[in-house]
Image: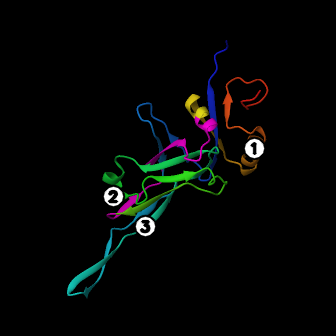
């Protein structure tokens, strides 16, 4: 019997040149970097007012969506979770208010850029290329038993990066016709699971 393994192939469209993932053997999640330099400011206290004989002061927090520089065509039945890295707050003084952020497979167009929602707790500047968050891929709650079974037997995920939008659409059309997002390595005919 030949040595084979299931391989999940995921298309990635690089919107901002130089955007990349960071893989570390020790960690389980994949690090993501800011695609542009962003300056955020600390919370600002508003005018004091009185209500029911008590004094109040509204505080406004600055909210920003940090672009991550790419879009990704997740397979049907799968989703990605985005969460801050362990040192994000200590280094940049930002929090992710909707942590973890969820991106499902319907958000898969070439212009559907991934972004991290961030609120500043202090003045800070995030430089382009700073590692601010991390993500992982998992089956969604709508995943069929077949999709879950494929996930169990998948040993590797291959991210295929496209800089040219025409190549993205050509590859996307091929994936639709192949009906499958998993492939067996060294398949002689095509990348589908049914050859």
User: In the visual, does 59 lie left or right of 77?
Assistant: left
Q: Residue at x 71, y 48 (%)?
A: 164
Residue 108 x, y percent position in the rendering: 64, 52
Along the line of sight, which residue is nearer the eye, 83 or 151?
Answer: 151
Q: In the rendered structure, does residue 140 fall within the stretch colored magenta?
A: yes
Q: What stretch is highlighted in magenta?
A: 121-148
Q: Is residue 151 above or below residue 34?
A: above
Q: How far apart are marks 1 and 2 (CA)?
A: 42 Å
User: In the visual, does 161 lie left or right of 91?
Assistant: right
* Quarter of the C terminus within the rendering: top right
Q: Which residue is drawn at 68% across and 30% down?
A: 183
Residue at image mark 3: 63
Quarter of the view holding residue 58: bottom left
The earlier-in-sequence mark between 3 and 1 is: 3
Residue at image mark 1: 176
User: In the visual, does 98 lie left or right of 49?
Assistant: right
Q: Distance between the residues labelled 3 and 1?
A: 37 Å
Q: Distance between the residues labelled 3 and 2?
A: 13 Å
The local secondary structure at tag 1 comes to helix
């Amino acid at each position: 019997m030949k040595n084979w393994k299931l391989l999940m192939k995921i298309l990635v469209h690089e919107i901002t040149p130089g955007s990349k993932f960071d893989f570390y053997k020790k960690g389980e999640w994949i690090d993501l970097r800011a695609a542009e330099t962003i300056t955020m400011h600390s919370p600002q206290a508003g005018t004091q007012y009185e209500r029911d004989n008590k004094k109040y002061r509204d505080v406004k927090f600055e909210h920003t969506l940090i672009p991550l520089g790419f879009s990704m065509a997740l397979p049907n039945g799968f989703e990605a979770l985005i969460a801050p890295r362990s040192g994000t707050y200590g280094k940049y003084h930002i929090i992710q208010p909707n942590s973890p952020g969820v991106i499902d497979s319907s958000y898969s167009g070439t212009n559907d850029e991934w972004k991290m929602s961030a609120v500043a707790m202090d003045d800070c500047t995030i430089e382009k290329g700073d590692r601010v968050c991390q993500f992982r891929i998992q089956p969604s709650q709508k995943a069929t038993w077949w999709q879950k079974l494929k996930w169990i037997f998948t040993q590797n995920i291959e991210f295929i990066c496209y800089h040219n939008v025409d190549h993205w659409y050509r590859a996307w059309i091929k994936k639709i016709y192949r009906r499958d997002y998993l492939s067996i390595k060294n398949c002689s005919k095509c990348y589908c699971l049914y050859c």
